Each structure stands twice: as structure tokens, then as C-alpha cells.
Amino acid sequence: MPTPDELKDEFWKAVGSDRTMMLGLPGVDGGHARPMTGLLDGSEGPIWFFTSTDTDLGQQVTARQGAVATFADKGHNLFACVHGTVSRDNDPAVIDRLWNSFIAAWYEGGKSDPKLVLLRFDPEEAQIWQDGSSLVAGIKVLLGIDPKQSYRDNVAKVDLG
């Protein structure tokens, strides 16, 4: 059973390698989250998202505001719901560090494209779940073991701020 710190470390490693998150703004556009590529500029947050002034998020994030990001790693071994704040932050130094050919494909004007918006998501807290595999749970039931306790041990609320 992992400790909260181990789940937190596992979360940051997974975000750094898998990157796809669902990002939403509570109370805006029905709170619908959108799939976004989250980039780290180091081993932990903030999490950076490139978007455009043509997108809903690019238009809706005009000041620092509350946001929620959800995450599932590619192997579905780790899940997280992360609360924090999001703001526009077109820092040229950060754009330079994060820029790559995949991002460049979206912006005709390159790093200085007037439509480019860099969102900074500052995570504050998260609930992180490690997979409580239904196969393993099924085997435990067959052996007369209650799988709920071990599942509870695979969940933690962690401070990310």
C-alpha cells in the first residue's frame, strides 16, 4: 500500500510522461473539461497548456481562476482529480523551454503567433487513486478477503501547492 507521498511522486512521473489531462473551469461552460496536453517544466508543477485565442479556454481564462484537471495514466494504473488555479502566462522564457515541433504545428506565426495562449495551471490539492484492479479484487473475494480495505489504502488526498 503506497503512502500519500509515494502516490504524489507517482502522479508527477505519470503526468510528465503521459501528459494528457482533462482541464475544466467550474461554473464556466457547464464545467465541461477538455482534453489538453499538460507539460511540466521540471519534475513537478505548475502544469502548462498551450491553447489559442480561438478556443473556449483561450477565451474564458482572462484572469486567475479556479480550475479542475483530471488525469488517467496510459495504463489506467493511476487516476487523479486535481484542483487549483489557471491563468494566462505567455512568458517567452517558458514558451522557449516548452516549445517543440508538435506545438509549432498548431501556430502559423510560431512562438510569437498572436493567437498563442499559454495557460499556467497551479495545482493545489489532488485526490489520487492507484488502480484497485477488479481482477485482483475478484480473486480476493474468491479467497474470502474483503477487497474494500486494500482499495481504501490506494487512495490519498495530497497537497500539491
Image: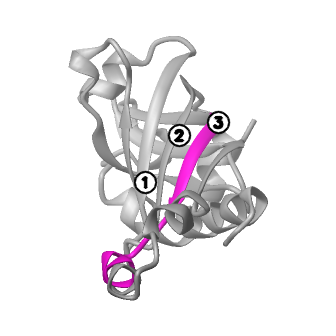
Q: At which x and y percent is residue 42?
A: 74, 60
The residue pinned by badge 2 equals 82
Q: Give the spatial CA distance, label 1 vs label 3.
A: 13 Å
Q: At which x and y percent is residue 98?
A: 59, 57
Q: Give the spatial CA distance, label 2 vs label 1.
A: 8 Å
Q: In this figure, which colouring scheme has been used for the structure?
A: one colour
Which of the 4 image quadrants contains residue 153?
A: bottom right
- Residue found at x 53% / y 72%: 17
Q: Nearer the viewer, residue 135 or 159?
A: 135
- Residue found at x 24% / y 29%: 32
Tell me the amino acid under the disc marked 3: Glu
Q: Which residues are magenta?
A: 123-138
The residue pinned by badge 3 equals 125
Tell me the amino acid under the disc marked 1: Phe
The residue pinned by badge 1 equals 71
Q: Are marks 2 and 1 in contact (CB under 8 Å)?
A: yes
Dot 3, crowdedness within 10 Å: few (<14), some or many (≥20)? some
- Residue found at x 38% / y 23%: 25
Identify the secondary structure beneath mark 2.
strand
Q: At which x and y percent is residue 58?
A: 35, 26
Q: Are marks 3 and 2 in contact (CB under 8 Å)?
A: yes
Dot 1, crowdedness within 10 Å: few (<14), some or many (≥20)? many
- Looking at the rendered image, the quarter that the N terminus falls into is bottom right
Q: Per the image, is 126 magenta? A: yes
The reply to whether residue 42 is visible in this rendering is: no
**Residue 127 got which mark?**
none
